[in-house]
């Protein structure tokens, strides 16, 4: 890949020095990943098995929680773990377990652990610990995926983000690092017309090679640019990386059209790690060298490839604080097919969203929240909306309009939602001035408080 001079300076010298100073082996790890991504699936699975057995042996010997758990099961990794197919015999790990045993989940010899926490957009934040090895692996996997799109660390970048974790970290040293890396952070919390005008100005002034952010935030900026007749496809933007929310088709189309760039979906989290990323051929590749992904049903049993199930992650670089069969709360579909790009990395065929992105009709039918989104998405009067299923008999709808909510429009929304949820369901439609994002800065169109069986 041909780099511009400053980008080459950052990617080949300054960022590697930055990682070396932090005692991360990110650079060597990325180089390994760029070789192994073209291995055949059998070779990747052999690597996973080797690393997984080492992780389990380490956990049994050095992590109090797993030492006690494995003893209670009479499970000895060196004796009892022979194949990847043995993994489902181990218990699932959930957030409640981590909260209850956080200190016991640290490896006894672990050093340099950093306290992390999730943004808590779907409930109570999760506090856990991360070691240098995992950070190196996650950064390397993200770096590899960035380079798939012909951009690199050091290329000008605009980041539209809302997490208080990242926004709170903008001290002087972080600001200096961002200037060197040519990264500009725009807060996604406030999306007033005045703030959006400022975002457009910042993007035009920076002329970034890449955008990064929530799909809802980038599509909102794109809609604002289109409404103002502001051209944004002449800046040389190569790609928009989106993550942290479900990417809807109309969001992808709007971002691509307005900014004149490709849109690359990413999937992961602060807890589960950098799980998968889309390549230019459209394949959602799992970072299989570092992560094993399973999908399970509401009883925790594995489901076949091609069928939806809850995504369960084992992160192979978490010896300091193991994440073994961790329930993400997300619903996805694993794929049997191979991507046309030639990489042997396995694929996520679909990421359907979180358990709370699904709604349950009055008769018990489970459907994706997108079924409700369709009712409001095409209404030109509706500028923004949020649907909250409070319980099986009551759903609340907030709408942002330029004019007062007229009875015909209110009745149209009520009828549309009742047709999907059931005639017995009470649908309350309320006009509001604005819809605030979640505490994490994310925006969710649909939230259900009705717990799914596997939630």
Image: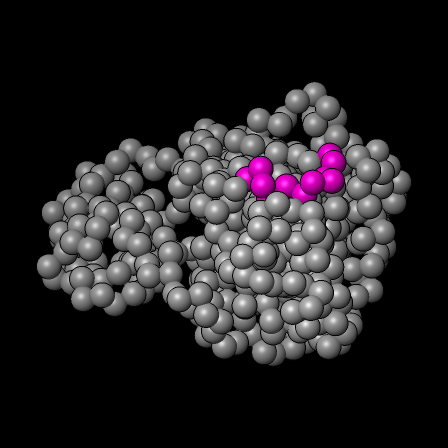
Residue 269 is situated, as x and y percent measured from the top left of the image, at: 56, 48
Residue 299 is situated, as x and y percent measured from the top left of the image, at: 40, 66
Nearest the camera: 406 or 335?
335
The residue positioned 48% from the left and 47% from the top of the image is 97
Q: Is residue 292 toward the left or the right of residue 377 in the image?
A: right
Nearest the camera: 72 or 190?
72
Q: Is residue 313 visible?
A: no
Q: Residue furthest top?
A: 172
Q: Is residue 160 above or below residue 75?
A: above
**Boundaries of the magenta span:** 102-112
The main secondary structure of the magenta stretch is loop
Q: Is residue 289 above or below residue 58?
A: below
Q: Quadrant of residue 204?
A: top right
Nearest the camera: 183 or 47?
47
Residue 105 falls within the magenta-colored stretch? yes
Residue 133 is situated, as x and y percent measured from the top left of the image, at: 74, 46
Q: Is residue 393 toward the left or the right of residue 2 in the image?
A: left
Q: Quadrant of the N terminus?
A: bottom right
The residue positioned 45% from the left and 31% from the top of the image is 190
Q: How is the image coloured?
A: one colour
Q: Is residue 85 visible?
A: yes
The residue positioned 52% from the left and 48% from the top of the image is 244
Residue 40 falls within the magenta-colored stretch? no
Q: Is residue 244 above or below residue 119?
A: below
Residue 454 is situated, as x and y percent measured from the top left of the image, at: 38, 61
Q: Is residue 299 toward the left or the right of residue 219 in the image?
A: left
Q: Quadrant of the C terminus?
A: bottom left
């Amino acid at each position: 890949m041909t780099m511009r001079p400053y980008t080459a300076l950052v990617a080949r010298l300054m960022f590697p020095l930055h990682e070396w100073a932090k005692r991360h082996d990110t650079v060597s790890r990325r180089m390994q990943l760029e070789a192994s991504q073209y291995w055949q699936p059998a070779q990747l699975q052999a690597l996973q098995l080797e690393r997984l057995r080492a992780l389990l042996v380490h956990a049994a010997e050095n992590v109090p929680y797993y030492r006690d758990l494995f003893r209670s099961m009479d499970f000895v990794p060196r004796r009892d773990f022979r194949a990847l197919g043995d993994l489902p015999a181990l218990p699932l790990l959930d957030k409640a377990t981590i909260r209850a045993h956080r200190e016991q989940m640290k490896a006894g010899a672990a050093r340099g652990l950093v306290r992390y926490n999730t943004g808590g957009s779907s409930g109570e934040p999760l506090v856990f610990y991360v070691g240098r090895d995992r950070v190196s692996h996650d950064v390397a996997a993200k770096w590899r995926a960035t380079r798939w799109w012909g951009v690199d660390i050091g290329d000008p970048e605009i980041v539209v983000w809302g997490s208080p974790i990242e926004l709170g970290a903008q001290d002087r040293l972080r600001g200096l690092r961002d200037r060197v890396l040519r990264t500009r952070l725009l807060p996604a919390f406030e999306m007033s017309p005045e703030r959006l005008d400022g975002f457009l100005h910042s993007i035009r002034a920076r002329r970034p090679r890449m955008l990064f952010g929530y799909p809802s935030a980038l599509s909102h900026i794109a809609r604002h640019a289109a409404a103002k007749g502001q051209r944004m496809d002449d800046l040389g933007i190569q790609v928009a990386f989106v993550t942290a929310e479900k990417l809807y088709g109309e969001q992808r189309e709007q971002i691509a059209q307005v900014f004149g760039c490709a849109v690359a979906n990413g999937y992961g989290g602060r807890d589960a790690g950098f799980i998968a990323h889309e390549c230019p051929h459209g394949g959602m590749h799992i970072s299989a060298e570092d992560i094993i992904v399973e999908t399970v049903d509401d009883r925790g049993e594995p489901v076949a490839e091609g069928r939806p199930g809850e995504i369960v992650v084992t992160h192979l670089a978490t010896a300091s604080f193991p994440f073994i069969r961790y329930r993400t709360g997300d619903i996805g579909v694993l794929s049997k097919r191979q991507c046309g790009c030639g990489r042997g990395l396995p694929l996520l065929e679909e990421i359907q969203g979180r358990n709370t992105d699904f709604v349950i009709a009055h008769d018990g039918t489970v459907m994706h929240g997108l079924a409700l989104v369709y009712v409001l998405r095409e209404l030109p009067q509706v500028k923004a909306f949020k649907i909250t299923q409070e319980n099986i008999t009551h759903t609340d709808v907030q709408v942002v309009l330029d004019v007062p909510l007229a009875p015909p429009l209110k009745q149209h929304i009520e009828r549309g939602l009742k047709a999907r949820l059931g005639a017995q369901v009470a649908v309350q439609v309320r006009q509001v001035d604005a819809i605030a994002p979640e505490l994490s800065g994310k925006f969710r169109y649909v939230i259900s408080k009705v717990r799914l069986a596997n939630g």
